């Protein structure tokens, strides 16, 4: 994946996290900078998981494992970030929406 793809995924995650606070009960409202910090923590945790367990366990990996790992990373990010509160159901919904948006936004430079 290119650096442009990484930046696009980071921005998408930031916007989705901001949006989730308004539509999903159990997900705290995040301002732009809080959502950006949350996206950074989620990206770093996803990177560490990918390094330890391989690409198939990455939050950006396709499939059920990537979806579940992404939801877990979102849920546990609340323990690192002040002001972020997420229920487990909201974490799964956020992971689903991030994955869905990721399917439709091209991240590769051709």
Image: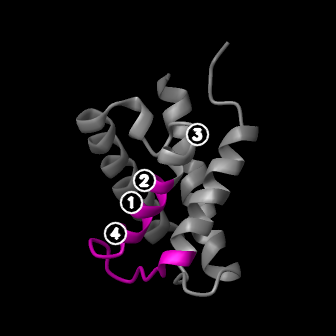
What's the magenta region?
68-89
Separation of marks 3 and 2 at Cα, in angstroms: 20 Å
**Toward which corner of the image does residue 94 lie, by quadrant?**
bottom right
- The spot of residue 56 in percent (x, y) is 43, 33
Residue picked out by circle 3: 8
* Badge 3 element: helix
Q: Which mark is residue 73?
A: 1
Separation of marks 3 and 1 at Cα, in angstroms: 19 Å
Density class for disc 2 (Cα within 10 Å; few <14, some 14-19, many ≥20) is many
Of the residues tagged 1 and 2, which is closer to the observer?
2
Of the residues tagged 4 and 3, which is closer to the observer?
4
Q: Nearer the viewer, residue 5 or 50?
A: 50
Residue picked out by circle 2: 69
* Badge 1 element: helix
Q: Is residue 84 left or right of residue 79?
A: right
Residue furthest to the bottom:
25
């Amino acid at each position: 994946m290119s650096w442009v793809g990484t930046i696009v995924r980071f921005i998408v995650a930031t916007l989705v996290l901001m949006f989730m606070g308004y539509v999903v009960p159990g997900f705290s409202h995040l301002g732009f900078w809080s959502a950006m910090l949350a996206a950074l923590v989620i990206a770093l945790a996803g990177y560490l998981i990918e390094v330890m367990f391989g690409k198939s366990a990455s939050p950006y990996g396709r499939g059920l494992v990537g979806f579940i790992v992404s939801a877990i990373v979102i849920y546990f990010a609340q323990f690192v970030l002040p002001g972020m509160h997420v229920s487990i159901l909201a974490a799964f919904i956020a992971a689903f929406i991030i994955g869905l948006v990721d399917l439709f936004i091209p991240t590769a430079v051709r």
